[in-house]
Structure formats: C-alpha cells, structure tokens
Amino acid sequence: MTIDTDKINQMYRHHYHLMPECGWMNDPNGFSCFNNEYHLFYQHYPYDTMWGPMHWAHAVSPDLIRWTHKEIALKPDKKYDRNGIFSGSGLQVGNEHWLYYTGHTDSHLDLLYDEKFKKKSDTAIPASEPLIRQVQCLARSEDGVTYKKFLDNPIIGIDQIPEGIRIEDFRDPKVWVHNNKFFMAVGSKSIENISHVLFYVSTDGVKWEFLNRLTLGKSFGTVWECPDLFELDGKHVLLFSPQDKPRVGYDFENVHSSMALIGSFDYSTGEFTVESDQEIDQGFDFYAPQSLLTLEGKRVMIAWMNMWDMKYPLHELGHGWNGSMTLPRELSIKDGRLIQRPYHTIENYQDIQVELNDFIISGEYKNDRLNDMSQRIDIKFNMEHSSHFSIDFFKGAKEKLTLTFNKNRNQMVLDRKESTYAIENLAYKNDYSRSQNIDLSKEVKLSVFLDVSSIEIFVNGGELVFTSLFFTEEMGGLVSFSSNGRTHVNKLLKWTIS
C-alpha cells in the first residue's frame, strides 16, 4: 500500500512548486515536451518518505508552474531494473514519447525489500560485496500516459561500457537529437573514483555506439550524475551534479553540487572543449538539474529542491511526503557565465502588488503589507552609507531565515540555523550558512520567492541564485529589514502568489 494521501500533513506544502502527492521525491527525469504539453517525471518512492527502490512518478503542465499528476509511469519490475528505475530523460520521436532511464540492480537491495516493495525483509545481509550493475534502458508511449518497456532492453549493457569505468556507476542518460542522429550523455565513475561523462551516438535511438568521454580529474568529484548537454547563445552547455567535489572558498559548500561547463561540443568526435565552469546554485537545496527547450524556444531548467546526506524534517515529523522541485528557470549566457531567471509564466500567478519607492532603512524596518508565507519580493538597494544590511524571512518570535550583506567584506550570507526544525548536514556539523562574494559598491537587485517552506533568491538578474528549504514551527510570515547605517531602497515590489 502507498501512503494514504488523505493523511498527508499540509503544513509545509508549497503553493507553486511541484511536490509528490505522497512519499519520497528526488531527481527530475524525462523533462520534455510531448504533443504540446510539458511532462516531468521524477525519482519517487511511494511507500515511505525516504529513498527506496526508485519509480518514475509523472506530472504534466501547460506552463511549467501548475502540474497535474498522472499514474506512476515506470516501476522496477524487470530483471534488469528490479532494484530501481534510476534517472534519465525523455523526448518526442515521431508520434511517440520515448523515455531513457537507468536500470539498477543490487543484490543488497534484493534482501532488504520484498518483490512488491511493501515491507523490509528479515533476511540477513551476506558479508560478501553486493553485485551492483547499471544499464541504460528505453520505454515508449503513444498517449503520454502508459509507457511500455522496450522488449530488447537494455539498449546499452555493461559490455558497452569503456574499459576502466565502474559498472556500479553508469547512469542517468540524457538523449537529444542533432542532424537526424541521436546522442546520449551518461554519468559515470572510473575505477580510480574519478568522474566522467560518456558520450554515445545512434542512428535510430535504439542501437548505440560509444563516441568519447570527458573528465576533468579528481578535483571535480567522484561521479558526475545527471549530465545534460544543449546549445545556448552560440555555446554548448553541459550541466551535471558532481558528488564529493571539494569546497573551494565559498563555492561547492554542499557535499554534492551542481555545475555548468560552457564551451563547444564536436558532434563528429564527441569532444567537449571547456571554456569556463561554475557552480549553478549557491544555496543549500539544489541538485540534479535537467533542462528542456520550451514551446516558445526558451531553454528552461528545473532541479530537485533538496539535498543528499541531510536530516529530513518532513520525514522525521511524519508528514507523509518529502521533496519538491525548484521554480523553472530560463537560462542564458552573459560574459561567459550561465544566468538564471524565473520563467515568466510564474507572473500569471502573481497578485496584489505593493510598491514602495525611494526610502531609507536605518535600524529596523517593518511593513505589515510585506508579510506573507507565499510571495515574491523584488528589491533594489544600495549601501553607499551603510555597512550591514539584512532581511529576515519567515520571522517569528524565535525563528528566522536571514540574508545579510556585509559591505566591508563584499559578502552576502544566507543563514538558516534559527529554526526549531533546523536542517542538519550529516557530514558537517553546524553547517547552516551559505556565502558568496558580491560587489556592494553598486546597486543590488534581488528577486525573492517564498513558498511556505522554501526560498529562492535571484541576485542581480540571476548572476547568483540561493535556494533553501526552511521549516518554521511558528509559521511566521513576517519579513523585516535591518540596517547599520542608511541603506537606500530604490524600489521594492511585492506580490502574493497563489
């Protein structure tokens, strides 16, 4: 039995972000258009609010904001995927919707779960190393609702993995078409624990040949998950999520990160030439981004709004659901860097505008018209005559999520430690803040999206983005400002979002 949706605790449910109807959610999968409708699948375990044998849940949308759930599209029920339908991609091929995914088998999980994935087994786990294999598979649909697995799966087996790559870490196929050929990028890891992306090519999307590989060495993590390659503004962009990438200053502060490489991809050789690299999101909760080309020709990205190796308050509180997706973000390239902006369709759900112009904040400032648990706030300010400026969100008597700007250090910091249900990093103690350098001698522009238990902060037109979950017991919707010196607010706009 799945979790009873009638018993889901609604306290922290979002208003305008995609969530599971019940159970566990992680990576977005199969993000694609089919018959002029947007489809998003995601890693899903319907029997618990923690990770389990993965299914593909399925939702559709006309605008990437309002989603309607369909029946579960893929379940782990074949010999080659019995322990999990891992991440992958989707695209329309003729009149069919094709889903590419990783079939995962793990003898360790065979002993933990029964064949119907309803209960844990009491069978003892052997001391020997469990055999794990990952292969690439295909499922197809004519109606965008019912998906049938390809009879000749897997379409890429372990015999097609290049020498030196681990069969345990060969996953997350992203497939696209260029000049009537199919191309695939797959995340992987070498036997030396060095991350790679493998490129394959096909004339029919079924029979594949290895083309080339890309690696940047040990300093870029142990495995690259969820690769996604596309063309944007005259360049090629490769998105991926490196596990265990070391921290560098204020960058890569999460145990697992998400990155973009900008450069050029040679379709004849499969060689990717890197011109620049960057972390995609500077916050706590952003992983496994996946993109599509919208019906109007915009490149839009969405990601899992959560993180691995963290304490999960929704699970511990027994709310019956766990996980959500970020807002869709339109991508562009400016001065060699990836820029992210909230996709414009969110504006169709914004209402009740508050506008404040040309005022000074000195000390504490509050305005009851700005208090809300689900809203957007755009603010432009300069700190010519102040040294510190801070904004508290979700503020109650004892709780708050604080964004601080320190002009002496040219630094901005997001701090979420002051919560009854503080989200703990299981790898690092007292890991409650994320920081970035920013030029505070200039005007700063923020677009802040609050949604009951999440925040997404777009800085200076999307040059930086901070994404974070935040669970407050008080459910305080107060927004307050504080300035050491005189901070000049040029303009502040507020909308509720329903």
Image: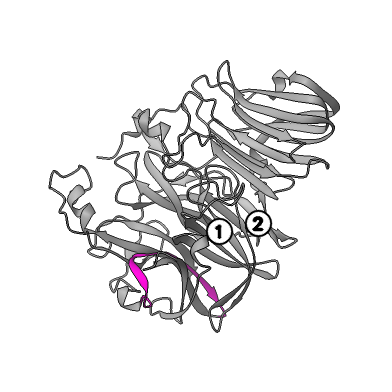
Q: Are marks 1 and 2 in contact (CB under 8 Å)?
A: yes
Residue furthest out toward the top: 397
Dot 1: element: strand
The residue carrying mark 2 is 331
Q: Position of residue 100 (x, y in %)?
A: 40, 65
Q: Is residue 168 magenta?
A: yes
**Which image quadrant is residue 233 in?**
bottom right
Q: Residue at x 51, y 46 (%)?
A: 254
Q: In the depicted view, which residue is nearer to us: 144 or 464?
A: 464
> What amino acid type should be assigned to the residue bearing mark 1?
Ser
Residue 291 is tagged as: 1
> What amino acid type should be assigned to the residue bearing mark 2?
Leu
Dot 2: element: strand
Q: Is residue 3 left or right of residue 203?
A: left
Q: Residue at x 19, y 43 (%)?
A: 120
Q: Residue at x 30, y 56 (%)?
A: 84
